[in-house]
Image: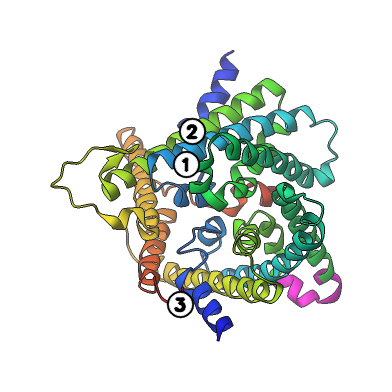
């Protein structure tokens, strides 16, 4: 039970996908114009990630090592097609809002990265816990970034008016430049927090984790 | 003239990275030095153009006639994965010098969402084959441009003294934001 909880909870803070591992940046930037869109994307990713971890873990003894990447991609792509069809049926407005980024879940490095780094080596329950935790962390991160951008860009939160009539919406935040700057500042804030903790323990401050392509699944697979 | 507008729009107005948020992982990940950036950018131009042309044919002659449009995502990603593998093998055999400079970037490209993204955008905008090729070539060039410019900026930033918490990825993202702001000036033109 405790290992299950450990695998689940690491995605919520220590390995928080977009902010700590710096993975899956495109949707993080693109769909967080509003908190609701970020949340919707996150839920779609939870679905794909948990099920792909489940399937990859189930098949881990069957899949030959040489063609494993192709197999992971097929698993992820089939699940993404399911999500697309489900969203078209039950959440069509959201599907239109997210646009091209729904099919692009398949190339989100988190999916392949977790399949390669975790699910292909661990038993089923642990893999599902890992997928759920990572997905939930991703959802929280996207909702947080979406809330910030929506609050300052439109003066609303989940569509509810928050700022009073005096507030002049800061449109920069909901456009592309705002997304980059906002994410950069959040990452810097996370690093500053880590360094503050390290200093209080008497350790030297360190540079934050960089986005290294090696941390994404694809490179790790190509020795 | 139409193609000229298409090219300008794809490179500057709707830049694939800075305005459409595609391919951000390699954009941040491979922009530490300009040599690497040029290699990655060229590999993307090359693969994106081929992938868009082939997926266009797959859609037109395979998926559409048999009413299989809902399989688009899975078909496209498989075509791209196979294409990347094939290009890698071909370059290794036929053009070893090119393989030496581009080879390490090729496996990365399968999961580069710019490549799949360009192929899907071409379908959603219902481009013809020639338009698809021109558009994907120009989009790839836009990616190359943004990547090389950011790499140049980051090489200089390495020499600057910045707070340690900002060093690396956070500062790169903020720089990308400023570049995106510059490209924002083109918005509304040639659309």
Q: Is residue A12 magenta?
A: no
Please, what is the dominant secondary structure of the magenta stretch? helix
Q: Mark 2 lies on which chain?
A: A
Are the two marked residues, 2 and 3, in contact with CB atoms closer than 8 angstroms? Answer: no
Q: Please state the chain letter of the residue tagged with numbered disc 3 in the rendered image.
A: B
Crowd around label 1: few <14 · some 14–19 · many ≥20 (10 Å):
some
A62 or B182, which is in the foreground?
B182
Q: Is residue A44 above or below residue B28?
A: above
* Marked residue chain, label 1: A
Q: Is residue B144 visible?
A: yes
Instruction: Say if mark 3 contacts mark 1, CB within 8 Å.
Output: no
User: Which quadrant of the structure image shows residue A140?
Assistant: top left
Question: Residue B190 at x, y = what percent?
Answer: 45, 77
Residue B190 tag number: 3
Q: Is residue A122 above or below residue A203?
A: above
Give residue A43's position: percent from left, percent from top.
53, 34
**Which type of secondary structure does the marked residue at label 2 adopt?**
helix
Q: Is residue A205 left or right of residue B71?
A: left
For the residues labelled 2 and 1, the Cα–Cα distance comes to 11 Å
Residue that mark 2 sits on:
A137
Number of the label disc, if any, that sits on residue A20: 1
- The segment highlighted magenta reads B91-101
Q: Are marks 2 and 3 on the same chain?
A: no
């Amino acid at each position: 039970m405790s290992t299950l909880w450990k695998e689940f909870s690491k995605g919520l803070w220590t390995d928080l996908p977009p902010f700590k591992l710096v993975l899956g940046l495109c949707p993080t930037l693109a769909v967080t114009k509003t908190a609701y869109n970020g949340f919707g994307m996150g839920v779609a990713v939870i679905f794909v990630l948990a099920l792909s971890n489940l399937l990859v873990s189930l098949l881990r003894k069957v899949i030959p090592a040489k063609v494993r990447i192709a197999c992971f991609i097929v698993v992820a792509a089939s699940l993404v097609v399911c999500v697309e069809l489900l969203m078209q049926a039950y959440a069509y407005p959201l599907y239109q809002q997210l646009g091209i980024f729904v099919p692009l879940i398949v190339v989100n490095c988190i999916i392949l990265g977790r399949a390669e780094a975790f699910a292909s080596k661990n038993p089923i329950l642990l893999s599902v816990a890992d997928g759920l935790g990572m997905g939930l962390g991703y959802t929280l991160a996207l909702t947080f970034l979406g809330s910030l951008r929506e609050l300052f860009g439109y003066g609303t939160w989940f569509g509810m008016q928050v700022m009073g009539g005096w507030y002049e919406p800061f449109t920069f935040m909901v456009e592309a430049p705002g997304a980059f700057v906002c994410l950069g500042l959040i990452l810097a804030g996370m690093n500053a927090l880590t360094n503050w903790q390290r200093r209080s323990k008497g350790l030297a401050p360190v540079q934050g984790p960089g986005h290294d392509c090696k941390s994404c699944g694809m490179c790790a697979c190509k020795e | 003239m139409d193609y000229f507008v298409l090219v300008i729009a794809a490179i500057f107005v709707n830049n694939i990275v800075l305005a459409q948020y595609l391919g951000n992982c390699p954009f941040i990940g491979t922009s530490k030095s300009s040599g690497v950036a040029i290699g990655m950018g060229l590999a993307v131009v090359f693969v994106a153009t081929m992938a868009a042309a082939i997926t266009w044919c797959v859609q037109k002659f395979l998926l559409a006639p048999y009413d299989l449009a809902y399989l688009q995502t899975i078909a496209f990603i498989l075509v791209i994965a196979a294409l990347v593998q094939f290009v890698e093998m071909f370059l290794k055999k036929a053009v070893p010098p090119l393989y030496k400079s581009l080879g390490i970037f090729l496996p990365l490209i399968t999961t580069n969402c710019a490549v799949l993204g360009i192929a899907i955008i071409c379908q959603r905008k219902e481009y013809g084959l020639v338009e698809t090729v021109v558009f994907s070539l120009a989009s790839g060039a836009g990616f190359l441009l943004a990547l090389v410019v950011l790499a140049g900026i980051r090489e200089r930033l390495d020499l600057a003294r910045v707070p340690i918490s900002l060093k690396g990825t956070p500062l790169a993202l903020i720089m990308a934001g400023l570049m995106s702001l510059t490209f924002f000036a083109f918005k509304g033109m040639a659309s």
